């Protein structure tokens, strides 16, 4: 039943948003209470959460706490182009005022340089397989475990195709 699945997906999204919001206010509370917190490292959540991130950035400024903003590979550039001028201004504000910007995708380095004239630090989000000892194991079934958003850009379909080729 498509309607039932849609309802469950929307309910899950609301619960997830509530969880993020509660977690964020927990971080705000911890920053307010803790006097020994020299750095806050925020992994960007984008969309409506960006406004909470601005609030946290301002609180860090007032408390003298360093603020590191981590832009994951994903939708930051797409959302910047798609969203309103208010959103774009807020995003640029975070980039301009953060003590350090980390990026997990090299394509964000020129993007950030162009937006706010700052150099982002590349912080790759992958495993260097050249340092892993490879053992060929014969098996009948290939199990694939993926944790993350299932969207075209993540390459999940290519991973499934590779598994199918390896299984032949």
Image: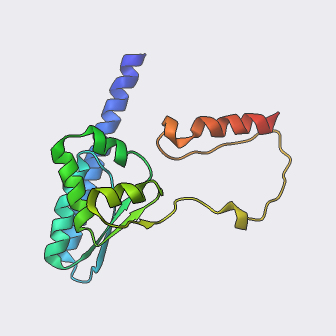
Rendered view: 62 above or below 165: below
Image point (29%, 51%), residue name: 20
Near-viewer residue (48 or 21): 48
Total marks in image: 0
Indicate left or right for 160 with 42 as reference: right
Q: Is residue 116 among what the camera can see?
A: yes
Q: For residue 47, what is the image quadrant?
A: top left
Give whichever of 87, 144 is nearer the camera.
Answer: 87
Give the image location of residue 84, x and y in percent.
Answer: 19, 40
Q: Which residue does the image show at 17% across and 73% down from the upper left? A: 61
Where does the image place residue 38, in percent across and percent down from the top left?
A: 28, 80
Image colouring: rainbow
Residue 44, relative to residue 29: is it above or below?
A: above
**Which sits in the foreground, 117 or 74?**
117
Q: Residue furthest bottom?
A: 36
Say which residue appears at 36% left-offset and 29% top-offset.
8
Q: Is residue 81 left or right of residue 145?
A: left
**From the image, which quarter does the N terminus lie in?**
top left
Question: Which residue sits furthest left?
Answer: 62
Q: Position of residue 17 (x, y in %)?
A: 28, 44
* On-image quarter of the C terminus: top right
Q: Residue at x 41, y 17 (%)?
A: 2
Residue 53 seen in render: no
Q: Is residue 34 left or right of residue 159?
A: left
In the rendered image, which quarter is residue 7 located in?
A: top left
């Amino acid at each position: 039943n498509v309607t039932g699945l849609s309802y469950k997906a929307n309910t899950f999204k609301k619960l997830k948003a509530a969880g993020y919001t509660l977690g964020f206010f927990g971080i705000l509370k911890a920053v307010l209470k803790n006097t020994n917190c020299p750095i806050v490292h925020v992994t960007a959540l984008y969309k409506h959460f960006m406004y909470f991130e601005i609030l946290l950035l301002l609180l860090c400024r007032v408390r003298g706490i360093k603020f590191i903003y981590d832009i994951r590979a994903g939708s930051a550039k797409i959302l910047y182009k798609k969203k309103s001028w208010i959103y774009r201004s807020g995003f640029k504000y975070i980039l301009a005022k953060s003590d350090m910007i980390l990026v997990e995708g090299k394509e964000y380095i020129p993007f950030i340089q162009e937006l706010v004239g700052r150099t982002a630090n590349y912080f790759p989000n992958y495993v260097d397989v050249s340092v892993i000892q490879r053992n060929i194991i014969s098996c009948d079934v290939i199990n694939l475990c993926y944790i993350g958003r299932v969207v075209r850009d993540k390459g999940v379909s290519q991973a499934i195709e590779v598994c199918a080729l390896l299984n032949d």
